[in-house]
Amino acid sequence: MSKEYSIAVIAGDGIGPEVVRQGLRVLEHVAAREGFRIRTSLYPFGAEHYLETKEIFPDGAFGEVRQHDAILLGAIGDPRIEVGLLEFGIIAKLRFELDLYVNLRPVKLYAEHLCPLKDKAPEDVDFIVVRENTEDAYAGIRGFFKKGTPDEVASQEIIFTRKGVERVIRYAFELARRRDRAKKLTLVDKANAVRAMDLWTRVFEEVGREYPDIARDHAYIDAACMWCVKNPEWFDTVVTSNMFGDILTDLAAMIQGGLGIAASGNIHPGRVSLFEPIHGSAPKYTGKNVANPLATVMAVSMMLDYLGESRAAGLIEDTVAALLRSKRIPSLGSDSGLSTSGIGDLVLEALEQKAPA
Ligand code: IPM
Ligand code: MN
């Protein structure tokens, strides 16, 4: 009996369904080729479903989703709906309730011409950001006082727990070791102003002593943004808090060619984890068959790697890289001259042409 993986699919809003469709075609192809099976369950949650039923993500369905081996998500967000309602009801719910404490974001440039930085080549842009995914301002401890009056007070707490900081830092040290590149881990924080981040400083030192083979490096978030543009080659593995990681990885996505290629994993090692493109639902491109599906294809590759199918994951990554290097896919925006399904076709053709290993 060949192996079978169960995948919960939440295609979501806007361009989500279009890009997920291409991601699933690629997934089915590599599964057949590598001899494992995929069983997908599709869940309809998102704006359309909410408008029709007033349901965001009911507990029954949530209970089902968590029984799968992994989750593939397209995009959530719709201008017709109150800001944050679906983002928190779906994405944040999954991150918090499944305790997906690592948000993993590879930043890898596949072809020089995709990089907006002058004189930077693929060997200069190849790092990975480990973003804490369950704490910080995202924990939702907030409130308003005298709302709507001139005396209004609004607050939201930044929280870090010893456990939460330690587990993500430990994950990052392990990853720096596994990557086996510069063997360097950079802690990105703002401990000079946000003094609560002294917890990160101390835990980084403490845990770091258990990893004498990994060099410890540090940058404040503002400087890290600068280095990301000026000397991205200085980064190997980066670990940071939830909100700083959110911001830094959008910037980082640009130097790898844009949101059209950037994928992420929301991971709790050993448990059901979620994979998604970093981009949003892009309402203005919805249904036009112009959105680039490569970020979702790369999310599928990350998912396979997580599931232990590293050969299939590598095959997808190499195929996408070759299509970009040869300029058969000339750019990553919606202006590439290629359609969503057309890019899917190119990836499948290139996979078919690759001689089996
Ligand atoms: C991301 C997104 C989310 C975040 C939003 C949609 C809440 O920007 O996955 O980076 O801030 O984490
Ligand atoms: Mn973000």
Image (cartoon, rainbow, N blue to C red):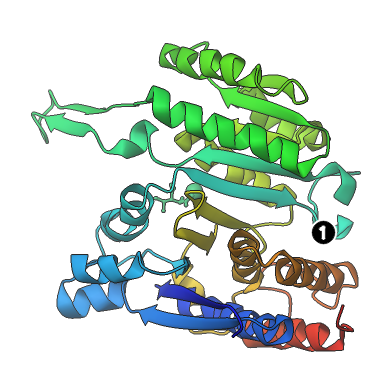
Amino acid type at image mark 1: Tyr
Residue 290 visible in this rendered orientation of the protein = no
Residue shown at the point (58%, 78%) measured from the top left: 3
Which quadrant holds residue 178?
A: top right
Relative vertical location of residue 270 with respect to residue 60 in this rendering, above or below: above
Q: For this rendering, which residue is in front, 11 or 301?
A: 301
Q: Is residue 52 left or right of residue 219?
A: left
Q: For this rendering, which residue is in front, 258 or 323?
A: 323
Q: For this rendering, which residue is in front, 318 or 253?
A: 318
Q: Where is residue 326 in the image (x, y as percent from the top left)?
A: 91, 72
Relative vertical location of residue 291 with respect to residue 251 in this rendering, above or below: below
Residue shown at the point (46%, 36%) measured from the top left: 243
Relative vertical location of residue 159 with respect to residue 47 in this rendering, above or below: above
- CB of mark 1 near ligand 1 (< 8 Å): no
Q: Where is residue 109 in the image (x, y as percent from the top left)?
A: 79, 53
Q: What is the quadrant of the N terminus in the image? A: bottom right
Q: Residue furthest front?
A: 1
Residue shown at the point (65%, 36%) measured from the top left: 174
Residue shown at the point (47%, 76%) measured from the top left: 6
Q: Is residue 301 left or right of residue 150?
A: right
Secondary structure found at label 1: loop
From the image, tell me which residue sits under label 1: 110
Which quadrant holds residue 22?
A: bottom right
Q: Where is residue 251 in the image (x, y as percent from the top left)?
A: 63, 43
Q: What is the quadrant of the C terminus in the image? A: bottom right
Residue 330 visible in this rendered orientation of the protein = yes
Q: Where is residue 245 in the image (x, y as percent from the top left)?
A: 54, 38
Q: How crowded is the residue under tag 1: few (<14 C-alpha within 10 Å), some, or many (20+)?
A: many
